[in-house]
């Protein structure tokens, strides 16, 4: 069999040739720009010390304002120590009116202490009438204590007679305590003789306790009437009649009296019409008194038949004005059993609510198909 020499790679062949020629083997040199480890020492290009002097492996200076890491040390522009002295990397003074953080301390314009003395950052005095918080303390206009003495922030005085709440406290005119001493808010004194409730307390003239000492309001505690004048109503008395069968005089000889020659009488209407006949005393004004009188009537027609009775009233003001108070709704019915035409005495205390008030007493005869009623010797006791 023919023997053939095997193929050897060129490098081995070259080595063999060198060896065979008796020379020294020289390792290949590192190529500093091809990205390979040419000399097989584990370092490529500029990472290989063999390339330290190669122009491609000289250190590059950092460019301080291009946004790149030019020298490959991981620090860019002004963050690279190489740029600390560069003009572009010097700290900039804060511009206090441009809205920017010029010196890079996280604070812009007047929020930066560097601007404390800047004119635009001085505290502005509060304008007390423009609706703005000028001094930036969170309070505007009159809500800011700086405006306490400003004319526009003064509470207006209450005008006590214009119907308005001038000082804004919810009270107008005389309802406002500020007006307590104002002339228009003084309670007028009661005029005791003009028929008017001057001081607004619901009582006029002598009915008002303010008039108790007034000469015209002296107590009137005298009432004594036996109708001996033969006139009904007598002087100072009045009557309110519904028909011609009303209050009139009656003499002792014809009708009989309790005492003396005359008494007052209501005749029954023979036409059987309804009767409502009132006899009112003069005004009295006193306290702690009772009214007494004598009366004669028919028990038969008043009680048995139920055809009439007489009510006794305290009258305030005019009769029928709504302020009248009944002392007895029916004096005959309240009396109980009695004999026809007997003279009987009646007495009723005047309620304390009428003490020192001007009042009158009223006898009211009400009935139809009734009988006479006689009244005599009325007295205040």
Image (cartoon, rainbow, N blue to C red):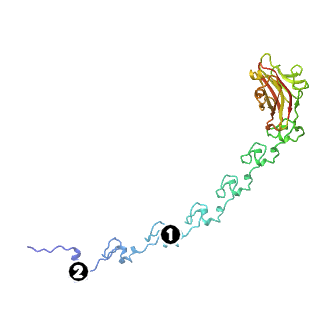
Marks 2 and 1, the one that precedes in the sequence: 2
In the drawing, does residue 258 fall left or right of residue 171?
right
Q: Quadrant of residue 307?
A: top right
* 359 left or right, relative to 44: right
Task: Between residue 296 and residue 187, name the one nearer to us.
Answer: 296
- Nearer to us in this view, 134 or 48: 134
CB atoms at circles 2 and 1 under 8 Å apart? Answer: no
- Indicate the secondary structure of the residue bearing disc 2: helix
Q: Which mark is residue 167?
A: none
Q: Position of residue 220 (x, y in %)?
A: 87, 36
Identify residue for label 2: 18
Rendering coords of residue 83 (x, y %): 50, 71
Using residue 55 as the reference point, say whether residue 255 is left or right of it.
right
Position of 135 relative to 328 (above/below): below
Task: For label 1, count other residues whose C-alpha is less than 10 Å away and answer few (under 14), some (14-19) or many (20+).
Answer: many
The N terminus lies in which quarter of the figure?
bottom left
The residue lying toward the viewer, choosing from 358 and 10, is: 358
Picture quarter with the C terminus: top right
> What residue appears at the point 70 percent right and 57 percent down from the top-left corner?
145
| Residue 78, numbered circle | 1
Residue 68 seen in this snapshot: yes
Compared to residue 380, the image places residue 250 above or below, namely above
Residue 124 in the image: x percent, y percent?
67, 59
Q: Is residue 174 above or below residue 376?
A: below
């Amino acid at each position: 069999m023919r023997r053939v020499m095997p193929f050897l790679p060129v490098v081995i062949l070259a080595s063999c040739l060198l060896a065979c020629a008796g020379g020294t083997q020289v390792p290949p040199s590192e190529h500093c720009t091809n990205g390979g480890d040419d000399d097989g020492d584990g370092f490529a290009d500029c990472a290989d010390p063999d390339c330290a002097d190669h122009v491609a492996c000289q250190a590059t200076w950092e460019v301080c304002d291009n946004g790149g890491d030019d020298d490959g040390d991981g620090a860019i522009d002004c963050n690279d120590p190489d740029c600390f002295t560069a003009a572009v990397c010097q700290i900039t003074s804060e511009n206090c009116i441009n809205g920017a953080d010029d010196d890079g301390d996280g604070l812009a314009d007047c929020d930066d202490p560097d601007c404390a003395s800047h004119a635009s950052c001085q505290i502005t005095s509060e304008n007390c009438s423009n609706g703005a918080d000028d001094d930036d303390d969170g309070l505007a206009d009159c809500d800011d204590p700086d405006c306490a003495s400003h004319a526009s922030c003064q509470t207006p005085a209450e005008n006590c007679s214009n119907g308005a709440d001038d000082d804004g406290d919810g009270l107008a005119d005389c309802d406002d305590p500020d007006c307590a001493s104002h002339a228009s808010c003084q309670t007028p004194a009661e005029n005791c003789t003009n028929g008017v409730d001057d001081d607004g307390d619901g009582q006029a003239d002598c009915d008002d306790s303010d008039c108790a000492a007034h000469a015209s309001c002296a107590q009137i505690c005298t009432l004594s009437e036996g109708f001996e004048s033969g006139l009904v109503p007598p002087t100072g008395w009045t009557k309110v009649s519904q028909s011609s069968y009303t209050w009139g005089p009656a003499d002792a000889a014809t009708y009989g009296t309790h005492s003396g020659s005359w008494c007052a009488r209501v005749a029954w209407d023979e036409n059987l019409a309804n009767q409502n006949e009132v006899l009112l005393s003069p005004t009295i004004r006193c306290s702690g008194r009772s009214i007494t009188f004598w009366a004669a009537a028919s028990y038969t027609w008043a009680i048995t038949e139920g055809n009439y009775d007489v009510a006794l009233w305290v009258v305030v003001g005019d009769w029928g004005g709504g302020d009248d108070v009944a002392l007895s709704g029916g004096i005959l019915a309240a009396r109980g059993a009695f004999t026809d035409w007997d003279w009987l005495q009646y007495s009723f205390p005047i309620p304390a609510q009428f003490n020192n008030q001007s009042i009158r007493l009223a006898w009211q005869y009400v009935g139809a198909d009734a009988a006479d009623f006689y009244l005599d010797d009325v007295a205040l006791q």
